[in-house]
Image (spheres, grey):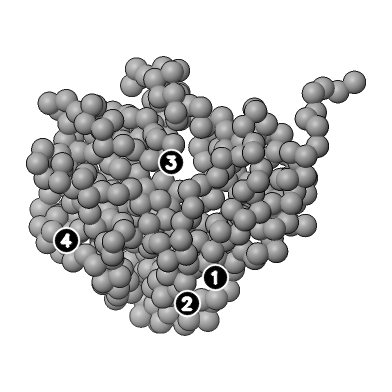
Amino acid sequence: MGILFAAPQVEYDLIREEWLASVAQIGRQGVFVGGAWVSKFEAAFAAYLGVDAAVGVGNGTDALFLALKALGIGPGDEVITAANTFVATVSAIHHTGAAPVLVDCNDGYLMDLDDVRAAVTTNTRAVIPVHLYGQLIDLDEWKAWSEETGIALVEDCAQAAGASRRGQAAGSWGVMGCYSFYPDKNLGALGDGGAIVSSSPETAGRLRKLRNHGGEVRYQHELPGFNSRLDPIQASALHCKLAYLDEWNAHRRKAAGWYRNHLADVAELALPGHVEPDDGSHVFHLYVIRVGGGRREELKKHLQKKGILTAVQYPVPVHLLPAYAHLGYGPGSFPQAERYAQEILSLPMHAALQEREAAAIGAEIQSFFAAPPVTGRS
């Protein structure tokens, strides 16, 4: 059968001629770091999100790290985030010298403000809500709480490019929004890339210095900085793709509807909540189901044999990874995250997925559960 899990190569084919022309222009000009294409994409991305500034950086992890550094966060501080996120969210906190503080997720895999409130101490400086799998957390109450408490709201938008709620884009609710442009993201580069967005001119100026050795002008280093700049070749690819982002996200929502139609009757599965095609609050970076009865790995292998690639994002919650054992959390600390890590399975999802492919995947899953479980081998 052969169904792609993600399809960045399809997106490349669509932008190839326009992108190659921009690469030729970059080559002729000889500006391979910074330059007009980076500025052009930053301006376009900021306008698309409705924020004042976008600052391109080397990758999504750097975006989170530099956002926290721009706030002056470091040793002695605490930053709250999710236990069921990609490790980069917690790594960014760790490398500032601050202590990551984790909270559990709800049934929709997202953080709840009540859990965040309960985790606050006198050392809490920021919270990083993660718009996981492309779902935009409703941050209305969060924003008011952040302004009241002085605890900075830094959004992890790595999987939510193009998501919006009531006309307000992911990344524009807090003091900063952090994006990854890893190639399989909804807005993906042809290599690594990231951005931090903000409507504070002071914050944007500080970020531009931090990403470039501490200064915007060569050899003028105003603060201790880092080397994390968005490549102009990647910026040109992102500029090409940005024009298609809403169309691609609409297709992902349509594909989610196809999956629901073909899987709604499978009692052993928990499906993502229904989203109307015009509801921008979920852009389905991933289509994540939960498989009951301890049969996740069995189903995964069954689909793989049929040429259908799936993935698990993420198989181990952050607090159970060896790298973060020192945080002091153990098994049972976050029961929802731990349980779901054993059940979640991501089905193919991308802007080129066809309805017949979603139907075929649904048929294979139905067939799997219709057959008696394999209990052993003779």
The answer for how far apart the CA atoms under marks 1 and 4 are is 31 Å
Q: Identity of the amino acid at label 1? A: Tyr
Q: Which residue is mark 3?
A: 108
Q: Residue 267 lies in what quarter of the image?
A: top right
Residue for badge 1: 12
Residue at figure coordinates x 41%, y 75% from the top left: 243
User: Judging from the image, what secondary structure is the residue with disc 4 in?
Assistant: loop
Question: In the structure shown, which secondary structural element does the residue marked by tag 1 occupy?
Answer: helix
Q: In the drawing, what numbered circle is on residue 269?
A: none
Along the polypeptide, which appears first: circle 3 or circle 1? 1
Q: CA distance from mark 2 to mark 3?
A: 37 Å
Task: Report the residue marked by disc 2.
Answer: 19
Q: Earlier in the sequence, mark 1 or mark 2?
A: 1
Where residue 280 sits: x, y (%)? 39, 61
Label 3: which secondary element: loop
Residue appearing at x 48%, y 48% in the figure: 273
Q: Residue at x 20, y 58 (%)?
A: 198
Residue 182 in which image quadrant: bottom left
Disc marking residue 199? 4
Q: Quadrant of the N terminus?
A: bottom right
Q: Is residue 63 visible?
A: no
